[in-house]
Image: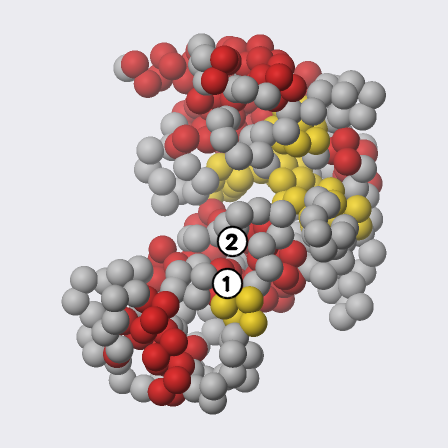
Amino acid sequence: MSNVTPLEPHAGCGKASTFVTLVTGARYATAASCLPQMLRNVGSLCPLLLIYNDADTALPMSQLEQAYGANQMLPLSLLKARYKWPPPRPRAQVPAAGRRLFSSSEAKNTHLKLWLWALPTTHRVVYLDIDILILRNIDALLDVVPPTLPDGSPGLGAVTCKTRYGERFFNSGILVLTPSLRTLEQLLELGRFASAPWNGQMPRLADTWPDICAPRDDPFAAKRLFRTKYASHSLAACQQHYGPGHTPRKMIKACESKYTDQSILNSVFHSHASLPRGFNMQNGDLDANNSAIVHFVGEPKPWSLMHNLRAVKEPARRNATARWQRQCATVMAASLRNRSR
C-alpha cells in the first residue's frame, strides 16, 4: 500500500526495526499512553510504534498522540487493507438471514493481534502487550534472531509457558516476529475456527462443507439451514448433510482457558525460540535479579484499580500493581481529567 510507510531498522537499536504495541479499545488507552514513558525510564532509545483500532471511536486520540507522536501511530485499518481476502469457494444456497448473528467485520476483528503480520516491513519487530510493567532496559530483544522454520518461513521468539504438554507452548504477550502476509493468511484461517460457531473445531483443509455451513462471511449459515437450539448442533447437522463425515480435530488451548490469539499462534508456530523468562514474568513476579518485564495476565489490570490495591489478593501482583501505578501516575491523572470534561 502506498499510504503505509515501510518500517526500517533504527540506528543503534539492533537488527529489528522497532518495538510495536497494539491498543484494541478505549479501556486500554491509559496503559498504552504510559508505555513510551516506561521505555524512556529504563533508558531505551529505540522507537515504539502504536497500532490503534480505529474502529473504536471512543479512543482518546489526542492523549495517544501526545504519548507517541502522530508519526509513530498506525491505524489498524491500513494493515487490514494490505491483505486481500481469498475469494469464497462456490457453495450451496443458504436461506437469507433475518437478524444477522455475526457480521463479517466482527468475524475478522476477533483476534486483532494477528494483524501484526501485515506490518509493512520484512524486518523483525518486537511486540509488547499493553498490560506490562517494564523494569529494566529491554533493547536486547531487538537483537534476537529466531531460527527459520522447516518450511522456510520466519520463526518466532517468545517466553515458554509450561503445561502438561511440556515446553511446547509460549505466551504471546512478548513476541519477536517477522511480518509476512503468507503467515497472516494461515493465522486468519485458524482464527476463523477459533471463533464461534467453531469454538476450536478445525475441519480438514480439503473439506468443502465448512464453506457451506459456516463460510467466513456468514459463520452462522448452518443455523438457518438446520434450525436447532444451539449453533454447534446446527453445525454438526450441516456437516452430516454436506460433509464426508470427517471429525474435526480440536485446537489445543495454549496456556489459557479460551481460544485467544495465543492458541492460534501456537497452532501455526509449532516451535519457537525461547526467550529468557525475565522478559515475560507473570503473576506479579518482581524478582529484581531476573525481571525485565512483568506481564499482568488476566484481571484485574493495574489501571482499573485506581485506589483499591486491596482488591489484588496476591502480594507479588499487588506490589507490581503499585509500582505500575507509581510509574504511570501522571498518565492516569491526565486520563481522569479527560474523562471528567
Q: Position of 21 compared to 223: left or right?
A: right
Element under disc 1: loop
- Residue position for label 1: 200
Residue depicted at 20% across the width and 75% down the height: 96
Sequence-wise first label, 1 or 2: 1
The image position of residue 331, as x and y in percent, is 49, 16
Which residue is at a point 38% across and 64% down the rendered structure image? Answer: 197
Q: Which mark is residue 140?
A: none
Residue 69 makes an appearance in the image: no
Residues 78 and 197: in front is 197
Name the residue beneath numbered marker 2: 259
Q: How is the image coloured?
A: secondary structure
Quick check: 22 above or below 308? Answer: below
In percent of width and height, residue 233 lies at: 34, 71
Q: With 240 as the anchor, is 12 left or right in this view?
A: right
Find the distance from the CA under tag 1 to the CA under tag 2: 7 Å
* Quadrant where the image shows the C terminus: top left
List x then y, in percent, for residue 58.
33, 33
**Residues at marks 1 and 2 touching, judged by CB atoms closer than 8 Å:** yes
Instruction: Name the residue: 73% across, 42% down.
Output: 159
Tell me the crowding category of disc 1: few under 14, some 14 to 19, or many 20 or more residues within 10 angstroms, Cα based.
Answer: many
| Amino acid type, mark 1 | Gly
Q: Mark 2: which secondary structure?
A: loop
In this rendering, the answer to whether 340 lies above or below 4 is above
Mark 2: few/some/many CA within 10 Å (<14, 14-19, 20+):
many
Q: Quadrant of residue 90?
A: bottom left
Q: Residue at x 36, y 87 (%)?
A: 241
Task: Please identify the residue farthest to the left as the structure is shown.
Answer: 98
